[in-house]
Image (cartoon, rainbow, N blue to C red):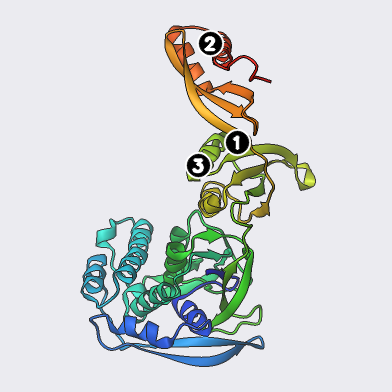
Amino acid sequence: MIGWLDLAAGASGDMLLGALVDAGVPLDVLQDAVAGLPVEPVLLRTEQVSRHGLGATRVHVDAPPSTHHRTWADVRALLGAATLEDTVRARALAVFARLAAAEGRVHRVPAEEVHFHEVGALDALADVVGVVAGFAHLGLRELHATSVALGGGRARGEHGVVPLPGPAVLELLTGLPVHAGPVPHECCTPTGAALVAELVDVWGPMPGMRPARVGSGAGGRDPVELPNAVRLVLGEPVTAAPGTPVVLEANIDDLDPRLWPGVLDALFAAGASDAWLTPILMKKGRPAHTLSALCRPEAVAAVQRAVFAHTPTIGLRVSAVGKVALARSQGHVDVLGGRVGTKTAMADDGAVLNVSVEFEDVAALARERGLPVKEVMRAATAAAWARVPPGEGE
């Protein structure tokens, strides 16, 4: 099963808790995880609410008031002593590590010196542990999410008036797709930002899937501009038949062209069978490129992540394609005092149809011998074809 989060109204811990419960995660699963924290009792309760006529679940976190400002070391010790599954503990620690690093960058201090204020309170601790436990309970293969609405304006925090989006939120979501959103207040909290940054695998529109369950988690506000809720859609992915190759494509017009070689290298490292660029013109005559990657089905998820990590695109086209491939074998030839890899392609009856040599080996040998690359290429190709038995080459 995979999941998709619609974050058009932003993200917060209580909204994510509500979406999980509304999608079918038992409240007891979240409560049991929160009860494992070695702190004063924190209780979760649900309320059915309406946001622009749409039903949603709001989860209230009832925690004793506290003025204790925990440090990152305090939170680590607390989670280390908690009665939690190892996977939940590790993921919760990773969320708070992101928060500590972001707060450290905002305040220009080492992460170890950060004092959590709002995000160190008991309700924030319950949000993190409960959300992590909820997604662990679902056991999703992948979690997808839209661009995150951040909001705008000003808000009063522990240190006084701060601009929105909050500085820590922007730090937490650096490199991920965000937008301001239509409301003049905070849409995404630091806790929500840290959770989605840690839990989401793929950013973009809803993937091909067969929806099975949908959950809506409401926030406390009910603005006129939009329904203030996070939606969680759960279902089975719509995939190509086993073994069917897949092509991923995106049109990109805002990437520094010097970065393209590194992007292609990252796609190959992620498992792409092939990757290439096609020059195009987009609207208003803007020059751009179509990035394409051919993948085996089992490599699609990793290649998708690589595309979103290394380019600014927030969406991909996914197409199953037919493919005809010749049988092939690899070998080598010794030429000009060096060794060059070869690849031989054969028809179904074993007839050799093509022989090619590995260019990187050719170029390295040319540098080593101080020869033009074309001479080494010619010699290596001739040596490779010479190994084909007479009558087998076509």
Q: Name the residue under label 2.
A: 376
Amino acid at dot 2: Val
* Kind of residue indicated by mark 1: Pro
Task: Work out how far the residue at label 2 is from the one at label 1, CA to CA, in angstroms.
Answer: 31 Å
172 relative to 12, above or below: above
Q: What element carries label 3?
A: helix
- Which image quarter: residue 242? bottom right
What is the number of the mark on residue 266?
3
Q: Nearer the viewer, residue 367 or 77?
A: 367
Residue 152: give x, y in percent of width and height: 56, 69
Disc 1 on helix, strand or loop?
helix
Foreground: disc 2 or disc 3: 2
Residues at marks 1 and 3 touching, judged by CB atoms closer than 8 Å: no
The crowd level at tag 2 (other Cα within 10 Å; few <14, some 14-19, many 20+) is many
365 relative to 99, above or below: above
Residue 393 percent across, percent down from the top left: 65, 19
Q: From this viewpoint, is residue 6 visible?
A: no
Q: As displayed, is residue 252 above or below residue 28?
A: above
- Where does label 1 land, which residue? 257
Q: Whole-Å distance between the Cαs marked 2 and 3?
A: 29 Å
